[in-house]
Amino acid sequence: MDSTSAEINSSEKMPSERPTPTPDTDDILTMAFVNMQPFGKIYNPEPAFRRGTLYPDLDKPFLRGGVN
């Protein structure tokens, strides 16, 4: 084999050549589950922008390093 060329094993596919996973295959990597949130109070636009959320129920403090 020439040192300037690369040989690719035909059984190994490049990421761009892999088929897109579909629900009928075993290739599903993740699945999201989101609980229904009852609609409640909302912040006015300015405080919502400062807090990063429109919903007071989702306004949780950021604790660097997690909860002790």
Image: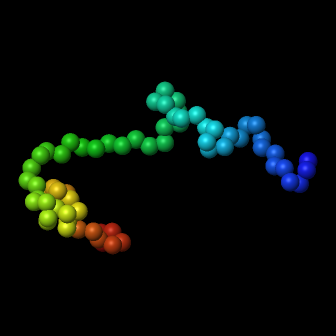
Position of 28 with respect to 44 (left or right) is right
Q: Quadrant of residue 59?
A: bottom left
Residue situated furthest top in the rendering: 24
On the picture, is 66 further left or further right than 22? left
The residue lying at 91 percent from left, 50 percent from top is: 2
* Image spot of residue 49 (x, y percent): 20, 63
State the image quarter where residue 18 is shown: top right
**60 versus 64 height, above or below:** above
> Residue at the spot x=32%, y=42% of the render?
33
62 relative position to 16: left or right? left
Colour option used: rainbow
Q: Which quadrant is home to the C terminus? A: bottom left
Picture coordinates of residue 34, whole percent (x, y): 28, 44
Q: Which residue is most to the left? A: 41
Residue 49 relative to residue 19: left or right: left
Residue 57 in view in this figure: no
- Residue at figure coordinates x 49%, y 42% from the top left: 29
Residue at point 12%, 46% (across, down): 39
Q: Quadrant of residue 56?
A: bottom left
- Counting the numbered discs, the total is 0
Whether residue 5 is visible: yes
Is 9 rendered above or below residue 53?
above
Q: Where does the image place residue 36, in percent across and percent down from the top left?
A: 20, 42
Give 4 or 25, whichever is nearer the viewer.
4
The one nearer the camera, 68 or 51, is 51
Which residue is farthest right? Answer: 1
